Amino acid sequence: MILIRLAEIFKEAVFPTKCIVCGSFFRFSGKNDSLYIKDSADKPFEPISITFEKLMAPFICADCLEGFLPAESPVCCMCGFVFKSREGKDHLCGKCIEFPKRFGKASAAGLYYRTFMEVIHSFKYKGKLQLAGPLETLLFSVLMLHWNINDFDLVVPVPLHVKRFRERGFNQAYVLVRDWGKRAEKLMPEPGCLKIGRDVLERTRYTEPQTGLGREKRMKNIKGAFTVRDASALEGKRILLVDDVYTTGATADECAKALLESGAMSVDVLTLARAV
Ligand SMILES: [Zn+2]
Ligand SMILES: [Zn+2]
């Protein structure tokens, strides 16, 4: 044990960690908690900012850790929009009153801004797959904060078009949920809870990246992009749709449309980040 600790101290002294957000070097002296799993569903889950800090401390310097903004109440109880005012209860935002979504509720871990934006970019585009485990744990914690494992029959990651899948080599939404079956069983030993429906949805139409498009253009761009492969798997099912970032909700809404039209009972949405 002492030898291991000495080796760690030596490693920290000689090879400090490079912050994946700002690139500066820092000394991480804590325990690498990045795959920590809660062992019981009875204990309350911690606020998301604390979970973020625990999971990301081995990768991010203290200054950048502070730049994470959790998506905390008051938020829109439909799309999850984080209201500027930090007082009052959750309520519907103006957009959701005007254009209600097809899904029930969308929740996220944090705002797509500075630290979290860079973390997600590193994971998605820069091949930092060491972030996959911590981000998966973070997302699972958000699920447990807002819902219960028993609230869903099926977790559906938003699929990539096969062309984009080949370019990137992995579907980030699937990587974020692939171990949830095991996690759920540990917390609540019920056979078959939280099934992952990896191939339930298919992205049959290739779409240009949604970046930089406004709400209407995004809706038009994504319309009819998803097809349900096996509708019999969806009949009466409560679905949790998962993606990395929620921007205008156009993608989530289009997926919800396809799932509901194929017989799903309800669709809720969970993402790592939410656009500001
Ligand atoms: Zn930093
Ligand atoms: Zn809203």
Image (tube, rainbow, N blue to C red):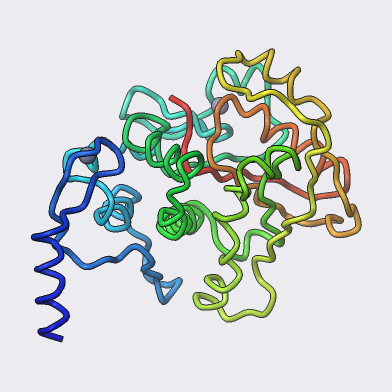
Q: Quadrant of residue 21?
A: top left
In-image side of 20 versus 125 (left or right): left
Is residue 86 placed above or below 27 in the rendered structure?
above
Rendered image quadrant of residue 250: top right
Quick check: 92 left or right of 167?
Answer: left
Image coords of residue 70 (percent x, y): 35, 40
Q: Nearer the viewer, residue 137 or 72?
A: 137
Q: What residue appears at the point 85 percent right and 41 percent down from the top-left corner?
A: 227
The quarter of the displayed image where residue 66 is located: top left
Measuring from the top left, give residue 214's x and y in whole percent.
60, 13
The C terminus is located in which quarter?
top left
Determine whether 68 is above or below 169 in the image.
above
In percent of the image, x 53 and y 55: which residue is there? Answer: 147
Q: Position of residue 54 (x, y in %)?
A: 27, 58
Depth check: give the residue in front, 92 or 175: 175
> Where's the N terminus, which quadrant?
bottom left
Q: Let me know if residue 187 appears in the view.
A: yes
Q: Is residue 250 left or right of residue 237?
A: left
Q: Is residue 73 visible?
A: no
Question: How far across and how far down the image is residue 199, in percent?
Answer: 78, 55
Q: Residue at x 53, y 23 (%)?
A: 93
**Can you tell me which quadrant of the image ligand 1 is in?**
top left
